[in-house]
Image (cartoon, rainbow, N blue to C red):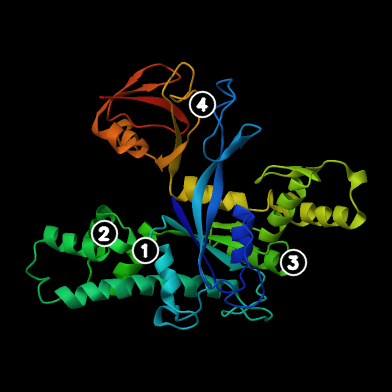
Amino acid sequence: MIIGLLGKPSSGKSSFFKAATMIDVKISAVPFTTITPNTGIAYVTIDCVCKELNVKCNPKHGFCKDGKRFVPVKLVDCGGLIPDSHLGKGIGNKFLDDIRQASLLIQVVDSSGLTDSEGKPTIGYDPETEIKFLEREIDLWFASVINRFMEKYRGKMQTMPRSELLTVLSEQLSGLEIEKGKIDEVFGRIGINDVEKFASELRKISKPIIFAGNKIDLKEAQENFEKLKEKYQNMVPTSADSEIALKKAAERGMINYISGDGFEISDPNKLESSQLKALEIIKKNVVEKYGSTGVQTCLNNAVFKFLDYIAVYPVADVHKLTDKDGNVLPDVFLVPKGTTMKGFAFKVHTSMGERFICGTDARTRMRLAADHELKNKDVVSIAFGR
């Protein structure tokens, strides 16, 4: 799974990326700090089934801490977009190409209003402005791709059967990683004559956008967030800088911290007064006020709330909950809700899907048919022909 990270320059995008991945990237108040996209592994969290099933798991990918399973996802931090990026303004639209494969987009918004649309310092800028212009930039990028199709097939569209029209349109949009069924849905609902409307609706269902209301540790951001939260219910208050500080403090043993939760200071007597003060500010202004720094919440919402994915554990041995090498609950797959047992087998390995026989539920030991719909945190084995 790929999540695209977007925003105007100086919105805190690179800080969010670092907070999510802890990869060192160049962070600066200078616009267009990100010249080439940063790609890294972030994590979504679930309550691991290891505690419920009374085993100690051995994750192959990600990790498990105190019963919290961290499942890896790919995060791509693209360069800052400004108004008319789709026309080549600023760094241009080459960064839009980097989100072609993304399943969902997170827009990092400078909720403080202390930078303008191009990332330059200002006072009183309305954060809603950047929400609207960035959404429009992506819609116009979609429209430019669709217009190329219209120019090529305009004279033939009236006589082409619907099935053929959808096939060639899907081919034209193949680079955007949009399922043919979603194209069919929008085509049937609004048609394609109004290209901008068609493009906007197609973008909404194929690459939904959620918002990280960043810099929430600042007073100005808190005031603006109160104005925005009713209109943009998919906005999460975030402080990427606070998340980075907490993770670094945890690495040094200064605090006990699991991303997405609160934190406790390990031994106050071992910290300098400046360190204690900084942690107290984060606790008071961010964690106690909003429940967390918001970075983990934003990632979890992206996958489980807006994409509506579930987590499923495949095992080879339903009795020991191990793979063929004896690793306990080694893998977790993120799949769309409604995924069937056979569909999941294809996700695990193509050959398993092609030679699928049946599945088995590790909890109940019940045999699962090909069309059985899986549930969140199911643990299953897959039987397939050799």
- Work out how far the residue at label 2 is from the one at label 4, CA to CA, in angstroms: 42 Å
Specify few, some or many for label 2: CA neighbours under 10 Å numbering under 14, 14-19, or 20 or more.
Answer: many
Q: Nearer the viewer, mark 2 or mark 4?
A: 4
- Work out how far the residue at label 1 is from the one at label 4, CA to CA, in angstroms: 41 Å
Q: Circles 3 and 2: CB distance less than 8 Å?
A: no
- Work out how far the residue at label 3 is from the one at label 1, CA to CA, in angstroms: 33 Å
Number of marks in the image?
Answer: 4
Q: In the image, 381: left or right of 6?
A: left
Residue 177 sits in quarter: bottom left
Mark 4: amino acid:
Asn
User: Which residue occupies the foreground of this view, 198 or 15?
Assistant: 15
Q: In the image, 304: left or right of 170?
A: right
Q: Is residue 195 visible?
A: yes
- Work out how far the residue at label 3 is from the one at label 2, CA to CA, in angstroms: 43 Å
Determine which of the numbered discs, if any, sits on residue 21 in the image: none
Residue 133 position (above or below residue 217): below
Q: In the image, 315: left or right of 221?
A: left
Q: Give the residue drawn at x 60%, y 54%.
A: 20
In the current view of this chain or complex, which residue is farthest to the front? 325
- Residue 341 percent coordinates (x, y): 33, 31
Q: Nearer the viewer, mark 3 or mark 1?
A: 1
Q: Circles 2 and 4: CB distance less than 8 Å?
A: no
Q: Nearer the viewer, mark 3 or mark 4?
A: 4
Residue 233 position (above or below residue 152): above
- Work out how far the residue at label 1 is from the one at label 2, CA to CA, in angstroms: 10 Å
Q: In this figure, which residue is indicated by the disc labeled 4? A: 327
Q: In this figure, which residue is indicated by the disc labeled 2? A: 183
- Residue 93 percent coordinates (x, y): 42, 75
Quadrant where the C terminus sits is: top left
Helix, strand or loop at label 3? It is helix
Q: In this figure, which residue is indicated by the disc labeled 1? A: 203
Q: In this figure, which residue is indicated by the disc labeled 3? A: 219
